[in-house]
Image (spheres, rainbow, N blue to C red):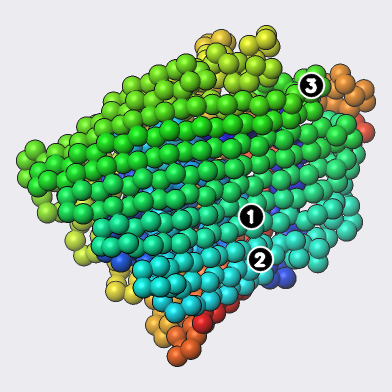
Amino acid sequence: MKLPRNSFITSSTALVLAYSANALSDTNNSVAVADNNVDSLDTVVVEGIRKSDETEQTEQTKKLSRVPAMMSDPLQAVFSLPGIVQVNEAISLPAVRGSGPADNTFFIDSLPASFLFHSVLGYSIFNESLIRDFGVHAAGFGAQYGDATGAIFDISLREPRNQPLATTLESSFLIASALVEGGISENQAFYASYRESLIHLVLPTVDKKNQSGTDDVTFEKYPRSRDWQFKYTFTANDYNRISLLSLGAQDSVTADIGLNANAALVDPGSAGQTSILTKFNSEGIKWDYEHGASELHTALSNLRSEEMDTRGTQHEFIRVNSDDWQFKTRYAYTTHTDTFAVGAEQWLQKFNYAVHLRYRPCTAFSPDCTTNLGPLIDLDDHQIVRTSAVFAENTIRLLEPWTLTTGVRYAHNAYLKETHVEPRISTQWQLNTNWSLHASWGQYHQLPEIVELLQSVGNPSLRSPTAEHYVMGFNGTLGNGWSLSTDVYYKKLDKLAVDVTDDRHYINAASGDAYGIEFQVNKDLTERLKGWATLSLSRTKRHNDLTDTTFRYDFDTPIVANFVVDYDLGRHWDASARWNYRSGFPFTPIVGNKENPDFPGFFVPVYGELNSQRAHAYHRLDLHVGRTIVGKKYTRSYFVDIINAYGRQNGGGVVYKPIAGTSNYKLEETKSLPFIPSFGVKISF
């Protein structure tokens, strides 16, 4: 279960985060700141062939690591794959195939994680050299995965190398990191990584608006991010391995919102100091047993998350601490013709929360959530949520070219007294040596957000949203280095939460669907020049049963296209480019203003038909050039990344901006990240 959507402070929070990202644009562009196993697009082609040496990255991960991205971050390459939309550049929230970011679930080496991307410039929470492989299961995933109606992000970290102690230091204008790795004994090894953003050092020198106060937002503590990973492995023998893993991330920022800031002109109560802190720590122990036809993987983990937001002269705040214990085990047995797997999972989640704020229920069906606030409430309580699940899955090769996988997942939630039995099925038919067909179907559910379930502000009788996924597609080779993959998908969503004005706060009274077709073309132009292109065509809608209205979903993007090229220049030089295009997001038009009932003399917007208009299209070009020099005692790498190379300033969305002292307003296109050149150095010794 994720942390709640804090609709009551969204305007201030979004303002601070957007301001920190766009402040870099005040530099006037003169200051530098900082063979793959393609089974189908329904796992979005990011899962590489398993190698016996798990201390190395897969070839697919190495390839994606060369895609131009913020902080040379390979996980950002998922936004160059079909079906995945980056909701916000500064935060990198992923929306996948018509589902929202909150509909996804994240795993790291079987451990749960609260988030994968920092809220400062949107880079991932991992040292890029530690990611062994990552998969994005966009739809129709198997019975081993649960608690997601959207997508599963499944990250695996590589094993520590049993080598003499080595250190890698890396720094650019935006981030610095250190990695220590080595062997302890013949069968023990570890690595430890720590990274910290440097934007809090860069922004004071380039934040011209902060100095002049024209936006009436000033930083008291500049945005700051940090993350860490530690992994220890004990290989008892050829069949048994025990791993200890600890990882975490933290983001923080403190700003002063002036009375002429956009948020304060709508809600003067938000003026004053705004402070945002989000962090998590996840620790676990994992036992891997592999012997002959048998595999057993068992993990025990603890995830502790904290979200603390404060704002305004009334000192409104929300603090949510969660303590999540999880046990997972999976056993698989493989014969010549089939593989049978069973597993079990158990979660115990404790939420401690304290709030002092103006609150009203908020969902995607209420565009005025952040402007028409509710009464001031005070809460200080806790809640325990227990969930258990078991699954079974069998893959059988019925004929030489035909593989069929059937599975079922059973889950029970004690808090909601809710049980789900979800069948899932997938199949693949190898037509010939070059082409194969695949299809999958499954039923899924996801627990509601915790804020939607609490007695005082939510509805303890709320049911879990459900989804039904259908996927069909094919993939194969065309000769001369060309390959093609395509998917057609349909998602049917039900029991979505709608906010209401009575004591129930939320009820299950909405549905939706998402459908589309995706293409990915790969081409090895030469041994040194490679690339791929993707095209996604889709539609996403929601239906409110209470009002009998249908509208575009917030992240409906009919067209998404990507083009990536990677060129080995020789002499240890490489270069790559990425171009991304997508339709603008839908938005609800403003048809007028009305006086704020709580603050006379101030005005709040009056909204028109929900998501009836669309922002202009978004597109961006990123470039990368790097060189690696291998020496006897150390290895040096240099790189230059250019983000938004042609300075496109449309973020694909629209923001409401009131005009101080009047009832007038204007709608402005949101800004992209500015042109950002960044130079970095990595030294390993």
Q: Is residue 516 visible?
A: no
What's the CA distance linking mark 2 and mark 3? 40 Å
What's the CA distance linking mark 1 and mark 2? 9 Å
Q: Is residue 409 visible?
A: yes
- 359 vs 184, left or right, is right
> Pointers 1 and 2 in contact (CB under 8 A)?
yes
Q: Earlier in the sequence, mark 3 or mark 1?
A: 1
Residue at the spot of label 3: 377
Q: Amino acid at mark 1?
A: Leu
Q: Earlier in the sequence, mark 1 or mark 2?
A: 1
Q: Position of residue 427 (x, y in %)?
A: 20, 37
What's the CA distance linking mark 3 and mark 1? 33 Å
Residue at the spot of label 1: 121
Residue 459 drawn above or below residue 263:
above
Residue at image position (28%, 47%) is 296
- 519 vs 511, left or right, is left
The picture quadrant where one finds residue 431 is top left
Residue 234 drawn above or below residue 301:
below
Residue at image position (86%, 18%) is 597
Q: Secondary structure at mark 3?
A: strand
Q: Nearer the viewer, mark 2 or mark 3?
A: 3
| Marker count (numbered) | 3
Residue at the spot of label 2: 174
In the picture, the disc for residue 33 is none
Q: Secondary structure at mark 1?
A: loop
